[in-house]
Image: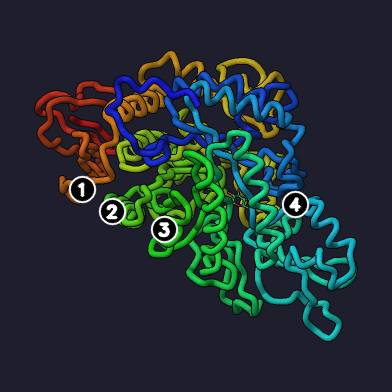
Amino acid sequence: MSARSTSDAPASDAPWWRHGVVYQVYIRSFADGNGDGTGDLAGLRSRLGYLQRLGVDAVWITPWYASPMVDGGYDVADYRTIDPRFGTLDEAERLIAEAHQLGIRVIADLVPNHTSERHSWFREAIASPPGHPSRDRYHIRDGRGPDGSEPPNDWTSTFGGPAWTRLADGQWYLHLFAPEQPDLNWENPEVMAEFLDIQRFWLDRGIDGFRVDVAHGLVKDPTFSDLGPEHLEVLATVHPANHRHWDRDGVHEIVRGWRRLIDEYDDRMLVAEAWVTPDRLRLYTRPDEYHQAFSFSLLESEWDADELRSVIAEGVTVAVPNGSTPTWVLSNHDVMREATRYGLPKGTNWRMWPVTGPVEALDEELGRRRARAAALLLLGLPGSAYLYQGEELGLPEVWDLPTEALDDPVWERSDHAQRGRDGSRVPLPWESTGPSYGFGSNGGWLPQPAGWSALAASAQAEDADSTLSLYREAIALRRRLGTADEAIELLDLGRDVVAYRRGTGLTCVVNLGTSPVALPAHDRVLLRSEPGGPDDPSGPDGALEPDTAIWLM
Ligand code: BGC
């Protein structure tokens, strides 16, 4: 691919992903090119200039494959076809080429834990009698009880309800997610062969890497024994080691096979989505496994200096000894957006809050301010940073979508105990006016709230103090300063302050307390999360206001 102009960045031979800023495109909600209400490749292609201007090194595109969209495309019916709602294979190839022209890498989403129930393998399996070899590609088993009418065990689905559904012939199949997402059996060699072939298919088309969905879920305990009455699956939370179906040692053998394939190509990468404990996460990035694995600790952390300091130290110590890099995430399409999360009182369970309330607990302005500070915290850290679309616009969670609009299976499967993830998936506002704020020429597949005009990308682009301008400046500075190495020195500036210094000379200070804090000695202020004012901290006596961050040199 043609290289982005990096003439002002210090030279580095490191592979791009080690320090890259990766922008997650949730394709259904990014930009709608054909006016059908769903984001698509045409929309994404038309906005590549925006992403280049933002300064990102890569995009990760959530599943774009043919899918019934029961789980937003994470139910794949054909891994080698683009869903017609998103475009065509030809368009995907054009997108990859155009992104490369602009110096932007393209990461695809690989979904190996399960297929859609519409996948030809599953159709074949359920059309075949028990014992037929096609059934062995999935976990299809007899039930319990005298007539087999009870599920094979007590495992539950992450979306709620049992993890087993009964077939017409009386057998049961396993689905850790929705019933429309049957789990594949990775003990079957055909599954490995197929996924190597799928990866080759996309690598040959220029894909720069894969974000691997549910990387910690592929292997199941062959005894299929019960988990016991206490267990409860919660989506997008850390799972214990060597659980009956999470984070089992066998998953590592699988990724080693993929890595051998990836290494046949130049400069490609694998990033794991593995919700596991930090001491287990380090196993995923051993030199012959994933290049990197998301550290979700930052995303899970409260707005609390102690907690953030230890999360930062841990993220570095988990990744670096293996030769990987810390891989930071503040939000994604599975969690509440941080501008809302940080506006809730400490200790609030933000997964439940949209249902349990109380509504008055939310301080939107505080959340907005903290999210901007968190952006500087994130973008100054060593390693790579994954941004979720709309984060750069400071979008809040739309936690009060009308229930009839909710699409995430979590809402129904949890018996309405959780609203699910739609609130972070609302179509992006591009323009201040017009239908769906420029998302497309019609409405979007989820309604956007009134009052998003000021958050539109076009409005923010004109405003030097906007969140978009803050992200643009921070990413440009990050590029200009270079990334040095993964070294980071945590500075002690008081109990409520997170501060660190990098080998590049960058010092980042974040005030999480309730009163201003004095800044350490510095030559210059590079950037601050809130525009200057009477309390402008750039003067020699400047102090940093609560819930703000600053970059110093
Ligand atoms: C994805 C989710 C998806 C699930 C099942 C996750 O980890 O990020 O959006 O629902 O995997 O594929």
Q: Position of residue 363 (x, y in %)?
A: 42, 39
Q: Position of residue 171 (x, y in %)?
A: 83, 72
Q: Answer with mark 2 or mark 1, whichever residue precedes in sequence.
A: 2
On the image, numbered disc 1 is attached to which residue?
490
Horizontal relation, residue 508 to residue 234: left or right: left
Disc 1 residue type (three-letter): Leu
* SS under mark 2: helix
Q: Position of residue 107 (x, y in %)?
A: 55, 38
* SS under mark 4: loop
Residue 462 seen in the figure: yes
Q: Is residue 355 above or below residue 41?
A: below
Disc 3 residue type (three-letter): Arg
Colour mode? rainbow
**Viewer-closest of 528 and 51:** 51
**Viewer-closest of 421 and 346:** 421
Q: Residue at x 68, y 56 (%)?
A: 193
For the residues bearing labels 2 and 1, Cβ distance under 8 angstroms: yes
On the image, numbered disc 4 is attached to which residue?
116
* SS under mark 3: loop
Query: Quick one: label 3, few (<14), some, or many (20+) residues within 10 Å?
Result: some
Label 1 – label 3 distance at C-alpha: 26 Å
Q: Answer with mark 4 or mark 2, whichever residue precedes in sequence.
A: 4
Q: Answer with mark 2 or mark 3, whichever residue precedes in sequence.
A: 3
For the residues bearing labels 4 and 2, Cβ distance under 8 angstroms: no
For the residues bearing labels 4 and 1, Cβ distance under 8 angstroms: no
On the image, numbered disc 2 is attached to which residue?
313
